Amino acid sequence: MTSIKKITFQNKIILELFPNVQKLLYSYRQIESCSFESGGILIGYENTRSRNFTVANATRPQPSDVRSRLAVQLKSGHYMTMKKLDSPYGYIGTWHTHPTQFPTPSDVDLADWKKCIQINCNTTSALIFIIVGIEGFRVWLCDSTTGYIYEGIAL
Ligand SMILES: [Zn+2]
């Protein structure tokens, strides 16, 4: 049985990743040599007292997404889902896949994450980004104020 996964960052923030999200990420791994990149939005909230993050849900790839072997662009479908969320749930970052064993963010990813932070405009103190590889996924936290990116370590 999958349980809540706890991930910590160098700035002491703890992230809780719900089992349904872990399963969703796992199901979109690019195992087949011809499979396309997938992506979606991470849904959750920041605990304003502890500054810890909870990712409770995520959107699946939408028909309108532009997907290829090495790239994915998230389109309006994801943002429509976001608008329907009840407080405290909201946009907390994004996830996407890479066709590699252990993924590393590309220059395009890093530029995109910086843009996400600017658009998010300090709505939360940070955003969470997940890249799903074939063997496993890696998690990063991008600080809204400093733009500094921390890699997550499983607790
Ligand atoms: Zn990428």
Image: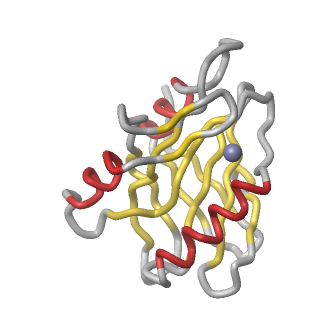
Q: Quadrant of residue 65?
A: top left
Q: Is residue 147 above or below residue 86?
A: below
Q: How many marks?
A: 0
Q: Position of residue 148 (x, y in %)?
A: 74, 76
Q: Position of residue 63 (x, y in %)?
A: 36, 31
Q: Position of residue 68 (x, y in %)?
A: 60, 30
Q: What colouring method underlies this structural image?
A: secondary structure
Q: Quadrant of residue 132?
A: top right
Q: Residue furthest bottom?
A: 145
Q: Residue at x 80, y 35 (%)?
A: 102
Q: Is residue 94 above or below residue 113?
A: above
Q: Nearer the viewer, residue 151 or 106?
A: 106
Q: Nearer the viewer, residue 35 or 122?
A: 35
Q: Residue at x 72, y 76 (%)?
A: 11
- With 1 as the anchor, is 7 left or right in this view? right
Q: Which quadrant of the picture is home to ligand 1?
A: top right
Q: Residue at x 26, y 53 (%)?
A: 80
- With 12 as the anchor, is 3 left or right in this view? left
- With 84 as the anchor, is 53 left or right in this view? right
Q: Residue at x 75, y 67 (%)?
A: 150
Q: Nearer the viewer, residue 94 or 15?
A: 94
Q: Position of residue 149 (x, y in %)?
A: 74, 69
